[in-house]
Amino acid sequence: MNLETFQNRVLPAKNKLFRFALRMLGSEDEAKDIIQEVFIRVWNNRAQMDQIQNMEAWCMRITKNLSLDRLRSIQRKGTYPMEEGFDVKHTDATPDVKTELGESMLNVNQLIAALPEKQRQVIYLRDVEGYTYNEICEILELDMNQVKVSLFRARNAVKEKLMKINAYGL
Amino acid sequence: MLMDSKKLEELLKKYWDCESSLEEEEQLRTYFCSNDVPDQWRETAILFRYFDEQKGKSVDPQFENFVVGQIKSTKRVESGKLVKLFYNTMRIAAGVAVLLAAVYFVRQELRSDNAVAVEDTYDDPQRAFEETKRALLMISKGFGNAEQQAKKINMFNEAQEKIQTPTTTDSEL
């Protein structure tokens, strides 16, 4: 793989990788740090990269693993509690975003943030990033059944809560 | 984008049951992100708008140049790695050399010990006989000394017997 191929095949995934890392880590600086490491790893192992069919899914998988490692090391050091890293509502609910999204959007944000980690990752990869089931399996290292069950549960949990909000204005 | 409510309901059902394709989900997203959504789907529309909004976040444009710059400088890192590899190899080689030298010297030492043992045998039988005699004499002298010392201990036995004899006679009486 030469620099041109790298720029055409790997670098365009930067925003997706950034969003995924940001979602897991909750800090833009940490997320940038992680994706920089991902790109350097891919470049250093470029000799083997030609055998990989879906480069983007592969990069997403490295991003997930590195982000998890970073979360663990942050947790070990006690820099900030686990919840802040995992919980999306903390990440997104900054005052300027609050006004921009409106109250309803914040409700949705909280619904999704309340989902279990696996379900949240699956619904995010499918409904925000638009990955196929096979790609999600590859990224999250899960089998097809687990992915489909997680997505089904996530969507239905969101649907139920949305219906409640609609009916009772909660 | 216009979509009749029947088709929309159908697509939504497929979506909630996780049976919709990526294209169908894209259709739903496009529909719900448009402005004219009936009130009954207001919350669903918010969900799709939320997904759409999440996709908008991006890393700053300078980041790509930064990564490319980092990658271009990896050649220097690689040469640094080579030097490091060389030093590590040399360290291991030095360790192995010390170990080999130690094994060599220990073996030399063992061999020289054996050599002394071999020198003890005399070629001349007469001399060997005299040496053996001398050694045996030395041992017998040692035994002689030991015997003299042992005799002193024997005094205790004699004394014990002398003490025991009157007591037995007392009991007989």
Image (spheres, coloured by chain):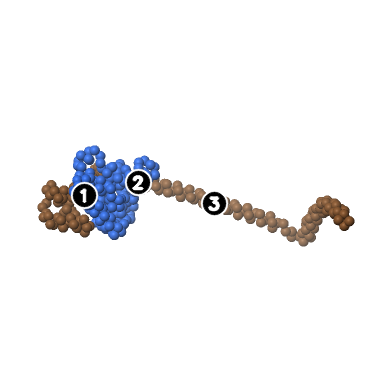
Chain colours: A blue, B brown
Task: Tell which tag, 3 or 2, sits nearer the viewer.
Answer: 2
Amino acid type, residue under disc 1 in the picture: Lys
Provide the residue designation for mark 2.
A71
Q: Position of residue A169 (x, y in %)?
A: 19, 45
Task: Tell which tag, 1 or 2, sits nearer the viewer.
Answer: 1
Mark nearer the N terminus (1 vs 2): 2
Q: Nearer the viewer, residue A15 or B85?
A: A15
Where disc 3 sits, the SS reads helix
Provide the residue designation for mark 3.
B99
Residue drawn 16% across the image and 54% down it: B27
Label 1 vs label 2: CA separation? Answer: 34 Å
Provide the residue designation for mark 1.
A164
Q: Position of residue B172 (x, y in %)?
A: 87, 57
Q: Are marks 3 and 2 in contact (CB under 8 Å)?
A: no
Q: Position of residue B108 (x, y in %)?
A: 61, 53
Q: Nearer the viewer, residue A147 or B70?
A: A147
Label 3 vs label 1: CA separation? Answer: 76 Å
